[in-house]
Image (spheres, helix red, strand yellow):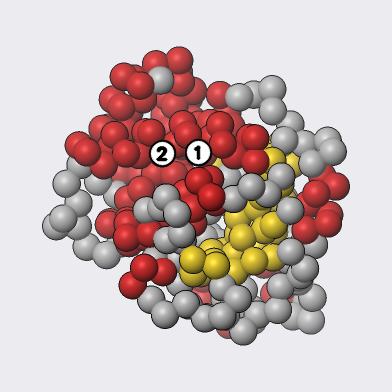
Amino acid sequence: MVVYVMTHKELAINFPQNYQLMMLGSTNKVVPPRYLRDDFGQNISLKNDSYCELTGLYEIWKNSDEKYIGLVHYRRFFLDRNYHSRFFLYFHLFINSHLRLEPIPEKQLKKYMQGYDWIVSTPEIEFGKSLWKHWGKYHHMKDIEVTEKVIAELYPEYLDSFNHVLKHNNKMSPFNMFYTSKTQLDKYASWLFSILEAVEERVDISNYDTYHRRLFGFLGEELFNVWLYHHSKLNIKYLTVYNTHLSNRREILKRFQDRGRIK
């Protein structure tokens, strides 16, 4: 039972028991003691600049034998309380700057597994009429169009779910964060990486800037929601995600002013 904390740098944060730090892109880095690597065994560590935290997910999928597995970020973690949206969470923080927030204990996540199949981040509205249009605002449309074609070829039974989630909906659970059983993870990861590998073969990102090179990490967020929607019989528990970088009123206010929403 492990919650893997994806990071690209050494951290000074104290995490609860059974949280394990994993250094991403570790093939080209000096990894601190007690940190796991994402280049052990079968791996895609060298693709970290385009797969983001998914190189850690791939490492877990291929090499972990834990019964229950979680994935969080070095600056984002689940709270043991649902504030319904990060907007309300940061509103609480703005009003009460002494509000204490800590990562949910792995023991509690495991208890949730008695009644749920997945724990994921609370869905958030991505401003715009649909996730499809939202994607076009920040990314290259041809990349999501290629993804649609790949799904139509490899998993045609998912095409209706893809269209519903991307084209007729503007809410999603972001960040590729979760807690679930290894059995569920294996099913999802096998599906996800087969799609991403096919997209990778058809999309040239060699001239993309640093942001757009993170293509497959971004696609993973969208596709995770397609997977969850398609498997509607799964029992899902939603938890609010807290960003440690937004820790004081000035930062929260600036985020509201810059974007008009929390991201």
Q: Is residue 126 visible?
A: no
User: Residue 74, relative to residue 59: is it above or below?
Assistant: below
Q: Residues within 10 Å of mark 1 (few under 14, many from 20)?
A: some
Name the residue nearer the viewer: 212 or 187. 187
Tell me the residue at 52%/81% (across/down). 32
Q: Amino acid at mark 1?
A: Ala
* Numbered disc 1: secondary structure: helix
Q: Amino acid at mark 2?
A: Phe
Q: Residue furthest front?
A: 41
Residue 108: x and y in percent read 83, 54
User: Residue 258, relative to residue 44: is it above or below?
Assistant: below
Tell me the residue at 74%/80% (across/down). 97
Drawn side of residue 91 relative to residue 251, left or right: right
Residue 229: x and y in percent read 58, 28
Residue 190: x and y in percent read 47, 34
C-beta proximity under 8 Å, tags 2 and 1: yes
Tell me the residue at 56%/31% (across/down). 187
User: Residue 247, relative to residue 113: is it above or below?
Assistant: below
> Would you name the residue on which mark 1 appears?
189
Q: Residue furthest top?
A: 157
Tell me the residue at 60%/76% (across/down). 34
> Would you name the residue on which mark 2 appears?
193
* Numbered disc 2: secondary structure: helix
Name the residue nearer the viewer: 186 or 188. 186
